[in-house]
């Protein structure tokens, strides 16, 4: 299987439950140093391969029309949104109340 940035969220969830703890992926790590995270994943999950570096995903990936509508833009990885949830604590609380716990 070729590992691309679009698989990161699904793979992170899979890794937390089915692969050793050293393979868990945190969004902050992936955003700060995407190629190191990709290398760590491919080193610890032997059936993964690399087609393109995570840092170049915006140059190679294509979005579904639904994702394009949701994202409004297709851009390179950056750290601008890290911690932005702290600016929206009322929404976070409302979502937890609506959907229950957000534990991984």
Image (cartoon, grey):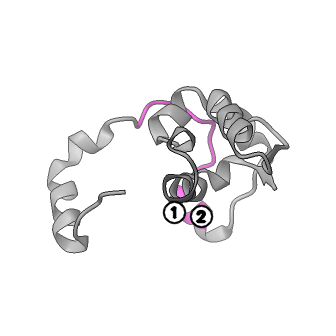
Residue 88 x/y as whole percent: 22, 48
Residue at 63% from the left image edge and 36% from the top image edge: 76
Q: CA distance from mark 2 to mark 1?
A: 5 Å
Q: Nearer the viewer, residue 69 or 29?
A: 29
- Classify 10 as above or below 47: below
- Classify 28 as above or below 64: above
Residue at 71% from the left image edge and 46% from the top image edge: 45
Residue at 37% from the left image edge and 57% from the top image edge: 104
Q: Nearer the viewer, residue 17 or 57?
A: 17
Q: How many residues crowd mark 2 within 10 Å: few (<14), some (14–19), many (20+)?
A: few
Q: Which residues are magenta?
A: 67-81
Residue at 29% from the left image edge and 60% from the top image edge: 102
Q: Magenta stretch containing residue 74, yes or no?
A: yes
The residue beneath circle 2 is 67
- Classify 103 as above or below 37: below
The residue beneath circle 1 is 70
Task: Give the structural element (helix, strand or loop) at label 1.
Answer: helix
């Amino acid at each position: 299987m070729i590992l691309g940035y679009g698989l990161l969220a699904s793979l992170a969830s899979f890794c937390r439950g089915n692969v050793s703890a050293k393979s868990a992926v945190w969004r902050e790590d992936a955003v700060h140093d995407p190629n190191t995270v990709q290398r760590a994943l491919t080193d610890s999950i032997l059936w993964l391969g690399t087609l393109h570096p995570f840092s170049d995903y915006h140059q190679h990936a294509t979005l579904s029309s639904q994702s394009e509508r949701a994202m409004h833009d297709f851009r390179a990885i950056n750290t601008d949104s890290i911690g932005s949830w702290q600016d929206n604590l009322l929404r976070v609380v409302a979502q937890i109340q609506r959907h229950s716990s957000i534990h991984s």
